Image (cartoon, rainbow, N blue to C red):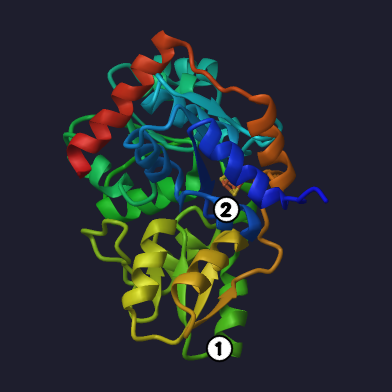
């Protein structure tokens, strides 16, 4: 009788045979996160993959993340299991639109969130993540104009915390923009002792800060709210939940984040700020698609060398300031 392997076992076999490393973003479905070699946010995953001897990276995330992995590890083959996995935020600005914006502000410094295409990164002076945006903005001389893109909520958050006047591109992630202050207020009324943990991309971020939260002026993504509200990146959420004395948390970001939080904190309780804060692009990747990707070497994402070189400069400039 022939032995029947599960999809997870087949993936494991091919991962070894092809010397592949499997990365899963925190918003991926639990089954995909559970078979990954590394889970985390987009930049940390690409950085972890670069330190491995793997020949192949399978990036379970969205397109700009696979591009970032290719920019950082150009010698490795980068695969994404579904080419349709895009990102509304990364699509909010094209390289042509950025070039036109720059021409209206000659001499301005361009700060781009990591959720951008490789072409947009190549047109930028600095890349930033939600946990480095404040430090990057603070590092830019006061007399320089700053173009911040593409997320208007993160931009407003950075402007508020640093006290700098930023030109902010009006882009948004449809998932995070849908999480509003009233959702948190409702959750707070049901769970009065819970800590509120908010990703700075959320639509509620600016209103929360202006309405009631005392955000410190030197905020650095390590949690800046007063009392029980923290503004944290996805990586920061995990670190904070582990060390916090709180037993209950309301999480304002994509609901996939609850899986790693619950795994790392089995004795604590996590509620989503909104049950429907679900990114359909992130949920496109399934175990069957990961297997097919490994079996057929699909779909390769490779950033042209000249674009990758310029894009990497914007990432390296951020790392020089923040690491
Ligand atoms: S949750 Fe929003 S920012 Fe993240 S991949 Fe989906 S669309 Fe893009």
Is 159 drawn above or below residue 142 in the view shown? below
Which mark, by number, is residue 35? 2
Is 90 drawn above or below residue 40 in the view shown? above
Is 148 drawn above or below residue 97 in the view shown? below
Residue furthest right in the image: 1
Going 42% across and 10% down the picture, which residue do you hit?
305
Q: Is residue 170 left or right of residue 45?
A: right
Task: Give the Cα distance between marks 2 and 1.
Answer: 33 Å
Q: Can you tell which quarter of the image residue 296 is in?
A: top right
Q: Is residue 317 left or right of residue 271?
A: left
Provide the secondary structure element on which disc 1 rests.
loop
Quadrant containing the C terminus in the rendered view: top left
Residue underneath mark 1: 191
Q: Can you tell which quarter of the image residue 103 is in?
A: top left
Query: Could one spot residue 274 in this view of the protein?
Result: yes
Residue 281, percent from left and from top: 68, 43
Which mark, by number, is residue 232? none
Query: Could one spot residue 145 in this view of the protein?
Result: no
Residue 291, percent from left and from top: 68, 39
Foreground of the two, 135 or 50: 50
């Amino acid at each position: 009788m022939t032995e029947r392997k599960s999809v997870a076992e087949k993936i494991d076999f091919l991962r070894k045979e092809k010397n592949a490393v499997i990365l899963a973003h925190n918003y991926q479905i639990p089954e995909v996160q559970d078979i990954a070699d590394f889970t985390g946010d987009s930049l940390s995953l690409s950085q972890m993959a670069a330190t491995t001897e793997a020949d192949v990276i399978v990036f379970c995330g969205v397109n700009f993340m696979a591009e970032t992995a290719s920019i950082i590890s150009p010698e490795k083959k980068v695969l994404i299991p579904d080419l349709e996995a895009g990102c509304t935020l990364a699509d909010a600005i094209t390289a042509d639109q950025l070039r036109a914006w720059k021409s209206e502000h000659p001499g301005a410094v361009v700060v781009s969130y990591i959720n951008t295409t490789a072409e947009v990164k190549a047109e930028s002076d600095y890349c930033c993540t939600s946990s480095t945006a404040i430090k990057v903005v603070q590092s830019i001389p006061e007399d320089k104009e700053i173009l911040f893109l593409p997320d208007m909520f993160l931009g407003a958050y950075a402007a508020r915390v640093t006290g700098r006047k930023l030109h902010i591109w009006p882009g948004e992630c449809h998932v995070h923009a849908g999480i509003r202050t009233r959702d948190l207020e409702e959750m707070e009324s049901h769970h009065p002792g819970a800590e509120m943990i908010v990703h700075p991309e959320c639509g509620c971020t600016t209103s929360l800060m202006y309405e009631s939260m005392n955000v410190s002026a030197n905020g650095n993504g390590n949690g800046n709210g007063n009392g029980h509200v923290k503004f944290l990146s996805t990586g920061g959420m995990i670190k904070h939940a582990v060390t916090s004395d709180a037993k209950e948390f309301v999480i304002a970001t994509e609901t996939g984040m609850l899986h790693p939080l619950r795994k790392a904190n089995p004795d604590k309780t996590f509620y989503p700020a909104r049950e429907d804060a679900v990114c359909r692009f992130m949920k496109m990747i399934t175990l069957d698609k990961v297997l097919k990707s490994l079996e057929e070497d699909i779909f390769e994402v490779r950033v042209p060398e000249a674009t990758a070189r310029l894009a990497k400069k914007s990432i390296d400039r951020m790392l020089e300031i923040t690491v």
